[in-house]
Image: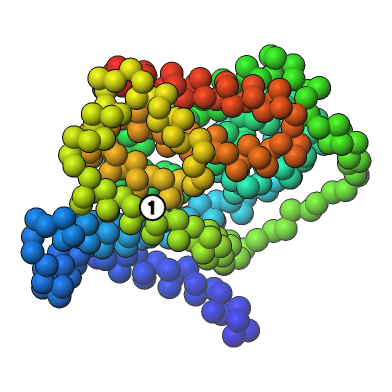
Amino acid sequence: MHIASLKNKAPFFLLSLIPVWVILYVSLSSISDFFVNSILRLETGKHLTETIRFFLFEVPKVFLLLILIIFLVGIVRTYFSAEKTKKALEGKSLFTGNILAALLGVVTPFCSCSAIPLFLGFVEAGIPLGVTFSFLIAAPMVNEVALVLLLGLFGWKVTIIYVSTGLLIAIFSGWVLSKLKLEKYVADWVYQIKTNNNQEIADKKLSLSDRIDKGYDSVKEIVGKIWIYIIIGIAIGAGAHGYVPENFLGNLLGNGNWYGVPLAILIGIPMYSNAAGIIPIVSVLIEKGVSLGTALAFMMSVIALSLPEIIILKKVLKWPLILSFVGIVGLGIVLVGFLFNFLM
């Protein structure tokens, strides 16, 4: 009874924390300024001072946003599962399947690290390769971590641009891959896996308290995995904010250089980071004069086409399919970069 009573009170306890969250969030600038100016007594305008000020402001800001959004998305995710996702994609027409798969990639708890089991599960369910790729492109590139960081660092306009173009790349890349009929380049052993179609996984009915527990678990799991990337990413961004000359990156990757977008993608592919690690760096790139399209292209290449992910996919795909995947997605990112450099 005691445990049940505590679980029933959990929603009210969490509601009581909302004012605390709001007060902390709106006070971050004042708190960071007080710490830098009054506690550390650093001289305003110096490189080190502004680096530390940036770091002390951005780290708690990002974590507050992440905790709130991941908690809410964690609750939403209790209504989804890998099995439900596969069933939702089965039997859909090609282009409809690509759209649905990309949208599901936004709200389901999968990242590029889950590429192999997801790929196998989708193949077993008879889902077309192109639809599978739409899901795998969207899941790591457009997720709640990316949304939170983009919204917090860039505002809603850039967030909408990134989400819409990310989804378009996922949808059309998957559709093109479907049209190329590349199924023969899936590793032979994948099709030899026997699927037990009779196995039914009953959906467990969860109470509101159970779903809140799942949201809390999501915060612990996701933040526990990415906190170091966030701190490293913000630290790099803070260093660039304080020390990199204003025009250096703008001259190298600015709007006036035709090679800015391709160069940004080539730099991004060998890197390995998730959205938590790369978005704070992209924020500083834009601040230093790198055009929006080039910065978005760099970010997308790091998240969607990282070398470690390609190495993982090699376990289930043959090189012609991998190269087609990289080429088509890369071309989509290049077009997005040039388009937004032209428009903005």
Q: Quadrant of residue 98?
A: top right
Residue 127 sits above or below residue 244 on the image:
above
Instruction: Kindly state the secondary structure of the residue where label 1 is placed.
Output: helix
Q: Quadrant of residue 83?
A: top right
Q: In this rendering, does residue 164 appear at all?
A: no
Q: Position of residue 295 (x, y in %)?
A: 35, 33
Residue 260 sits above or below residue 306 on the image:
above
Residue topped by disc 1: 233
Q: Amino acid at mark 1?
A: Gly
- Please state, as top left, top right, bottom left or bottom right, where the C terminus lies in the image: top left
- Please state, as top left, top right, bottom left or bottom right, where the N terminus lies in the image: bottom right
Left or right? Give the position of 154 relative to 92: left
Left or right? Give the position of 27 relative to 41: right
Which one is in front, 209 or 141? 141
Q: What residue appears at the point 38 percent right and 59 percent down from the top-left corner?
A: 231
Q: What residue appears at the point 80 percent right and 51 percent down from the top-left corner?
A: 201
Q: Position of residue 183 (x, y in %)?
A: 78, 23
Q: Position of residue 293 (x, y in %)?
A: 34, 27
Farthest residue to the bottom: give it.
2
Q: Residues within 10 Å of mark 1 (few under 14, many from 20)?
A: many
